[in-house]
Image: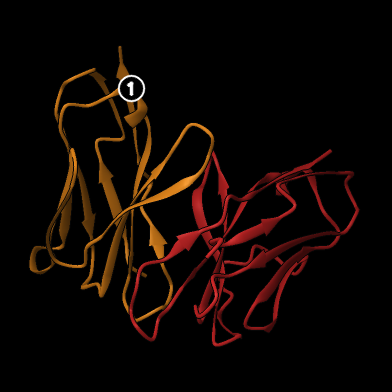
Chain colours: A red, B orange
Amino acid sequence: DAGVIQSPRHEVTEMGQEVTLRCKPISGHNSLFWYRQTMMRGLELLIYFNNNVPIDDSGMPEDRFSAKMPNASFSTLKIQPSEPRDSAVYFCASRNSRANTEAFFGQGTRLTVV
Amino acid sequence: GIQVEQSPPDLILQEGANSTLRCNFSDSVNNLQWFHQNPWGQLINLFYIPSGTKQNGRLSATTVATERYSLLYISSSQTTDSGVYFCAVDLDHGQNFVFGPGTRLSVLP
């Protein structure tokens, strides 16, 4: 398996623009997590899905952030409109919660909003 | 929610030295993992260890679930061990995987 795949790896955008981050989980994994990493706040859980259903989005910072999982092999995290304080590395992770196995992370998307 | 603490926050070692990193958590957990974030930002799985002891080369880990802590041992450290070490826990199967603040390790040649 290729592991968790995130795209793009780097994104630079202007304030006010819409940004969409993408994630393909490991095949067979039924739980998917989105995290944000900053120097100030460390690794924060934004939202997680179980069987394509959002379970807890209490970590999503505000209404500008939204996440979807239309099927078991794809998820998106959208920021609209983006702001400079959204600059961070965004990670996606997946695991097989039915078998209670470990989580694996993608390589992350480094977002810079100027 | 569950609280996860790690100590020490920073650690500087000479190459060849041994170290112990600690992770404390505030509630019973179903799962615990240790990760290494390398200088390029990649999160690398080290151990999946909700309880007991595991070893992988120079690294080993022990989790005492009843006392709510886990330890990561690094022996004969190498410069490539530098980076940030995180523990992460969750309460329910596949739910809400929470990270500690990490221990930043620097191994000097």
B43 to the left or right of A23: left
Q: Which residue is mark 1?
A: B79
Residue A113: where, in percent of width, then height?
80, 43
Between residue B61 and residue A113, name the one nearer to us. B61
Other-residue count near label 1 (Cα within 10 Å), few / some / many at <14 / 14–19 / ≥20: some
Image point (71%, 44%), residue name: A87
Please indicate, yes or no, whether residue A26 appears anywhere in the rendered image: yes
Please, is residue A41 above or below residue B68 in the view? above
B70 to the left or right of A47: left
Please, is residue B21 above or below residue A77 in the view? above
Please, is residue A24 above or below residue B4 in the view? below
Q: Write down the quadrant of residue B52 in the picture.
A: bottom left
Quarter holding the C terminus of chain A is top right
Q: Write down the quadrant of residue A96 in the picture.
A: bottom left
What amino acid does circle 1 point to? Thr
Image point (23%, 20%), residue name: B13
Residue A6: where, in percent of width, then height?
66, 58
Residue B108: where, in percent of width, then height?
31, 15
Image point (24%, 72%), residue name: B29
Residue A10: where, in percent of width, then height?
74, 44
Between residue B63 and residue A61, name the one nearer to us. B63
